[in-house]
Image (cartoon, helix red, strand yellow):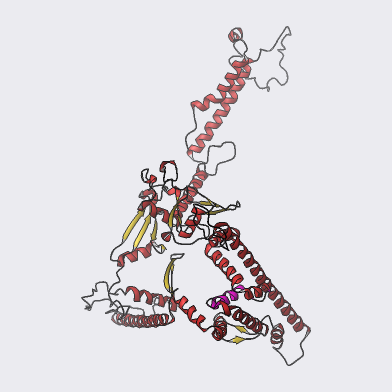
Amino acid sequence: MDGDTGRTTGGPASPSGSADSFGSADSSGPAGPSADGAAAALTGLTAAAREGWAAENRAAAQRLVACYALVQECWREYGHGIDGSHEARPGHAVVDGLVAAAGYVVAAMSISARRAEKMLSFSWELHTRYPAILEAMAAGLMEQRVAELLARQMSTVRGDVLEQIQRQVVEDYLGGVAAGVRLGDKALRDEIDAVIGRHDPDAIRLRKEDASRTRGVRIGKGVDGMSSVSALLATEEAAVLAEALDQRVAEHDAADAGAAAAQAAAQAAARDADPDTDPDAPTEPEPHYSKGERRADALMSLICGDTPTQPNTTPGNTDTDGDAGPGGPSAPTGGSGNGGGQAPVLRPKVTVIATGDNGRDEHGARVEFTRTGEAALQTLLEMLATSDGASFEQVDPRIGAADDTSAALKYRPGAELARRVRLRDGTCRHPGCAVPADDCDLDHVVPFNHADPASGGHTVEANLVSQCRRHHRFKTFSDWTYQLQPDGTLIVTTPDGTTMLTRPDGPLAQYRREHQRDEADAWARQQRRNPAPVFGVGILDEATYFARRAQRLARERARAAARNAAEARAATSPPPDTGDTPADTTPGPDSASAPRERLTPAAASRWWERNKPPDSALEKAILHALHEHLDELLQPPPPF
């Protein structure tokens, strides 16, 4: 329905009309049971969808009521109070209660700080200026998007007529919905302005003046190598820009058509000159460019100019020789508009995040444009080939590489340290805030001690974060606690014990995380080839020479330990008592197959029997410990 300026009927308010439209596909005969069942099913589903829509509207109203109560409480706690009954706490600045309430909403709903502040501001407006709209939402008859549109249109209405205007606007809207009228956004705004114009004509003029102050151009970092450029202009300016873009698109199309015709003529001449050329040889298809892509090319052409298609063409020498190429003399792709065929002057600022160790940074260096994010290598090379110069900035990604012992005792960070912190953070580090780090303050997480800087709160990377001015003041004067981890992770704890965690998302932090993942993957691969020396667990996945050697040594040590233990037991045990019983020397039937008992040298020596030392439990314990650990001390396993 967005942008629809007409009126349509039907929808959830008139399910019978929808059922008739479905059932009238064939009016020549009576409707059968299947048609009645389908109509009943559609009616039931439509009613269920409408009930869900109404429940969602009621839930939105309930959420806004709770947000209003939260804002009031935060103003009483952190600010002067709603009624100005008490002053701020001594030694503390007045903290915006809206910022504090937004922090609690972010913790509860996991939304951005901007969206939370917008929700809280809207709840305040509904309770203080537009109670009729809130009543319609609580009844389930109006969704929040429409409520915001109505409030925005009446934002400049005088207070003495606001009650009358909003009641009439809400009644007209709900009456139209009940009657089956469906208005698009533009038509709805026109209806509201008609009501406002009858009671407060100056409100429309004031609203347009306020809107003119929002005019501007914004550039934001995108994803997948793309960035966004948005412009909010006056209607007249947008119309002129659209006409200029369309004109430049037409010039580019004409130049492309001329170049294609010249190329086709050159190919035909080449075929005529060479009879062996296959006339039916397939040609490469022309790439398809959408209207949006052509407008993007036209915008860059209008702003930066166009590069001549002929490489050796200079602004002062536009003559072309006969051997200009198979396409003949080439026309500039930009036509005769701004730039006059001159190459655009580009001086990109490039940030390269690398340690400087070529062996370590192979396939791992990160390239960033200062304002638009990560750049593809091919795009960077093409830009450098056509640029007038470039500024390269190399950043060492190691944590604390820019820290200095003497500078750590100064309150203001140096330029290199400040740049590193902003490259690490990317945005304001308060939970949910997306203000770019370049527009933020640098805040000491542990406060800087101006009286004794050596006692704590040093100016180092591990104690600095980017905070926008509003959240910087809030962090300084509120009772929330902040803790910064060495990798830049910020842990925020509210007074009620809720903990929130934010991680830096700047290019430096992304490089560190990628490097950490690469190191973890390399260690996992190493462990698959050569795992930790834990033996007896199972067969190794990929047994290398050192792993096999370690296994063999472990088996030899186990056998030696078992042999030594047996010898020690035999040495300390008394000899068998033979007495006067004559030995049976008659070989039995199994004597040939009976295994021969293995004797230790001590057991077979009569000298040992006569001269063995007295039995001592302490000596046996020492011998046992030596036999268990002496081999390990003398022959340690190889390092891994």
* Residue 468 seen in the current view: no
Q: Residue at coordinates 53% horizontally, 39% vertically from top-left?
A: 532
Image quarter where the N terminus lies is: bottom right
Of residues 353 and 433, the one drawn nearer to the viewer in this rendering = 433
| Position above or below: 282 against 425 | below
* Residue 344 seen in the current view: yes
Occupied quadrant, residue 20 = bottom right
| Position above or below: 530 against 597 | below
Q: Tell me where residue 321 appears, x and y as whole percent.
A: 22, 78
| Position above or below: 389 against 405 | below
Q: Residue at coordinates 47% horizontally, 76% vertically from top-left?
A: 211
Left or right: residue 175 versus residue 33 is left
Left or right: residue 30 versus residue 536 is right
Of residues 234 and 592, the one drawn nearer to the viewer in this rendering = 234
Left or right: residue 11 versus residue 241 is right
Residue that extends furthest to the front in the rendered view of this protein = 85
- How many marks on residues? 0
Q: Which residues are magenta?
A: 139-158
Residue that extends furthest to the bottom in the rendered view of this protein = 28
Q: Tell me where residue 382 appears, x and y as whole percent.
A: 34, 66
Any magenta on residue 88?
no
Q: Tell me where residue 440 appears, x and y as whole percent.
A: 43, 59
| Position above or below: 18 against 366 | below
Q: Tell me where residue 145 appears, x and y as whole percent.
A: 59, 74
